[in-house]
Amino acid sequence: MPLFPKKLFSLLLTGLVLAGGLGLGSCSKGGDDPAPPTPTPPILPTPAAGPSQVKLWLTTANKSSLFQRVPLRLNFVAPTAGTNQLPSIGVDTAQTYQDIDGFGFTLTGGSAYVLRQMDAVSRAALLKELFATDSTWIGTSYLRVSIGASDLDAQVFSYDDLPAGQTDPQLAQFSLAPDRKDLIPVLKEILAINPAIKILGSPWSAPTWMKTNGSSVGGSLKPEYYGTYAQYFVKYLQGMKAEGIRLDAITIQNEPLYGGNNPSMLMSATEQGTFIKSNLGPALQSAGLDTKIILYDHNADRTDYPLAILADPEARRYVDGSAFHLYGGSIDALSAVHNAYPDKGIYFTELWVGSKSKFEDNLRDHINNLTIGATRNWSRNVLEWNLAADQNNGPYTSGGCTECLPAVTISGNQVTRNVAYYIVAHASKFVRPGSVRISTSMPTNLPNVGFKTPSGQKVLIVLNTSGAAQNFVVQYRGKVMEATLEGGAVATYVW
């Protein structure tokens, strides 16, 4: 088919906006724009007349299109002299890489709290929009929760808090009560919608009485409490299982090299390796728990940390893989860890969106570095920080993050969808758990990643990092599909 002219493409999008056919994005433009009274099902525009082999969802840098189904006729045809001159993304389903566990968010205690402030009908509608897996919704497939409080809880807590000077080495006072008010009920509602969703748990700190400084901020785990802390994990996993909530995996410590958050705890690679091989691994095994142990859970600039632990065969046998954030380093560092231990998984577990940053910058950077970059560097998942907060980005602890923009801002029953919502939606809706990454080529200014789903669909996510519209072709099985993508836009193609 002929190239779709940029002007005509813009007119089509304008017509769709005026007609109200903006799909999920029609409810809110994100950022500071007005929110809808309650979440509503998306209205997808009717495709153009005639057959179309490929479906397209689009988000633009100027927010004129927000995860919108665009009804273009996109087909694979024989290449011509004209198409041979265009930048080309070659898709090869025969060359496969890692399996995908899912795409999603961190469900902080604060997220659960603001969700629970909604009325039951509005909350059910939003949770369905976020987690249902039929064709209408975005199908979030992976969640991270905090084991105890994170800095996006209203207050700091563990599951065994004691007055100063007291200890509880037998964990007689252990209780999940702090999570039973909001987090556990919300997780149960989510599991009722999507029972197969994967959940990862990460602690921000051990109980203060186990720590060298007796504080929720910084300090390290006392060696005499390594065995006790391993049983703390066991009790947590068993307690959540009793609530009907199975955790697929845990990390041992969120950001173990940073002790300035509230809560936080320092843990060196040597300490974490010793804890895994001598305490946590054997404890989970003895309790009959198959929850995966994922190490590190910090920035990509310190690959020496996971590599040091994986080099120890006694620790390595208990470890499923390594988790990363991207507040430091380059995303391609993940491949170095994979290449050293290709039988161990790679996971991407956190990157925040700053409330004072620009939609278009975050859309470009997160799609480029996470959706595309992390998966092209072997990550089995991609998680945005965090799912939900109020209009002041709260709640948060004293010393916690005050500018973490959530995927959805909730004010009463009103919902504003922010950039992380659309970033995750471009992958989560289509790249279902069990999908596999496939080989795709990377033309200049068109970073991309491809997947093959369990049902046999092909999914290609493409970003135009340039400031101008880009014509290109997708090559598949000897044929080509012509496409145009405006500057800064991201598109998901499904066939």
Image (cartoon, rainbow, N blue to C red):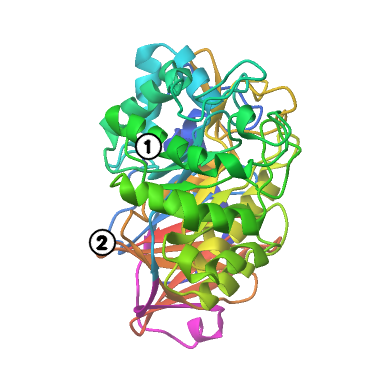
Q: Residues within 10 Å of mark 1 (few under 14, many from 20)?
A: many
Q: Is residue 290 visible?
A: no
Q: CA distance from mark 1 to mark 2?
A: 30 Å
User: In the rendered image, which quarter is residue 243 located in?
Assistant: top left
Q: Quadrant of the N terminus?
A: bottom left
Q: Is residue 324 above or below residue 357?
A: below
Q: Amino acid at mark 2?
A: Pro
Q: Position of residue 121 (x, y in %)?
A: 35, 15
Query: For numbered disc 2, what is the local secondary structure?
Result: loop
| Image: magenta residue range | 73-97
**In the picture provided, is 475 more to the left or to the right than 495?**
right
Query: Toward the viewer: 384 or 319?
Result: 319
Does residue 481 lie above or below 302 as drawn?
A: below
Task: Locate residue 447: give its quadrant.
Answer: bottom right
In the rendered image, residue 457, in percent from the top left (x then y), is placed at 29, 63
* Disc number placed over residue 237 in the picture, else none: 1
Q: Is residue 141 visible?
A: yes
Q: Earlier in the sequence, mark 1 or mark 2?
A: 1
| Residue ID for mark 2 | 454
Q: Quick check: is 93 in the magenta stretch? A: yes
